[in-house]
Image (cartoon, helix red, strand yellow):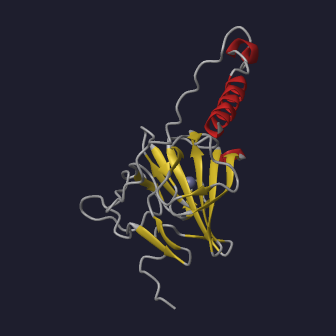
């Protein structure tokens, strides 16, 4: 007798469950209209490989400026793979592949004078991925005047990196989003005030722009 009652209760709840799952869902045409939207393109950044670690950086040619001493094979002698900063090691060349076309400092001009170049120019006519130089949080991602499409990352301890002239930016990047070291963040381009496809790469520490080629070649002593 008890058993029969128990089964009866089970049966009732099973029926209730059926009623719930039978609630009609909106058909796609009710939500989107007659034609559902095309499947969005997969985000190319989701499955892209992490940044390669470049053991050397070659000068682009004879037309570079402020690139320091260059060896017999065209290699930039100042280059080391990491910039050692108070926030940890950052990639000195956060590109898929590139050569150094311009260094940090005053760029002279044939007519005299010149202007300060605030970062490194890493060039590749074929573009390619740009990567977060280190772990951090997005401060800015979007167009910014002559810098074109810009990503700016805060790495902690007043260390920031900035990536300019990007062809495109990973659409998932918004201020506050955390990025891992070496994660792809965009693609090299020539948006804004640029005469060729390159990355303009800036590093600032305590609000001061440093020379990303010369700074932090040795790991700082552990305090
Ligand atoms: Zn530049």
Name the residue furthest left: 72
In this rendered view, identify the residue nearer to me: 126 or 182: 182
Instruction: Give the position of the N terminus as an image quadrant.
Output: top right
Task: Work out whether 16 lies above or below 54.
Answer: above
Q: Where is residue 48 in the image (x, y as percent from the top left)?
A: 44, 43
Residue 32: name its quadrant: top right
**One can see residue 8 in this view:** yes
Residue, far bottom: 223
Q: Is residue 201 above or below residue 78?
A: above
**Residue at point 31%, 62% (across, down):** 55
Q: Nearer the viewer, residue 147 or 193?
A: 147
Total marks in image: 0
148 vs 21, nearest the viewer: 21
Q: Can residue 110 be seen in this view?
A: no
Q: Is residue 165 left or right of residue 121?
A: right
Left or right: 62 in relation to 162: left
- The residue under the point 52% across, 91% down is 223
Question: In the rendered image, which quarter is residue 30 located in?
Answer: top right
Which residue is at 42% across, 76% downward? 217
Q: In this view, does 202 lie above or below 3?
A: below
Q: Position of residue 181 (x, y in %)?
A: 49, 60
Q: Where is residue 65 drawn, in percent x and y? A: 47, 59
State left or right for residue 96 relative to residue 110: left
Q: Which residue ends up furthest to the front in the rendered image?
A: 1
**Front-lying residue, 129 or 36:** 36
Ligand 1 image-quadrant field: bottom right
């Amino acid at each position: 007798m008890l058993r029969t009652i128990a089964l009866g209760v089970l049966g009732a709840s099973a029926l209730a469950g059926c009623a719930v799952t039978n609630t009609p869902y909106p058909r796609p045409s009710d939500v989107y209209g007659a034609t559902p939207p095309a499947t969005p393109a997969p985000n190319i950044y989701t499955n892209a490989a992490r940044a390669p670690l470049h053991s050397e950086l070659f000068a682009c040619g004879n037309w570079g400026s402020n690139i320091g001493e260059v060896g017999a094979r065209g290699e930039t002698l100042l280059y080391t793979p990491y910039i050692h900063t108070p926030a940890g090691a950052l990639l000195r060349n956060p590109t898929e592949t590139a050569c150094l076309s311009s260094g940090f400092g005053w760029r002279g001009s044939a007519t005299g004078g010149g202007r300060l170049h605030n970062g490194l120019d890493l060039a590749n006519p074929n573009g390619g991925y740009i990567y977060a130089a280190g772990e951090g949080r997005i401060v800015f991602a979007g167009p910014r005047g002559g810098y074109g499409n810009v990503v700016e990352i805060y790495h902690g301890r007043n260390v920031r990196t900035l990536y300019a002239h990007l062809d495109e930016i990973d659409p998932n990047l918004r201020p506050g989003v955390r990025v891992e070291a070496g994660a792809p963040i965009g693609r090299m381009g020539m948006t804004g005030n640029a005469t060729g496809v390159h990355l303009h790469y800036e590093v600032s520490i305590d609000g001061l722009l440093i020379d990303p080629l010369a700074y932090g070649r040795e790991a700082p002593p552990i305090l």
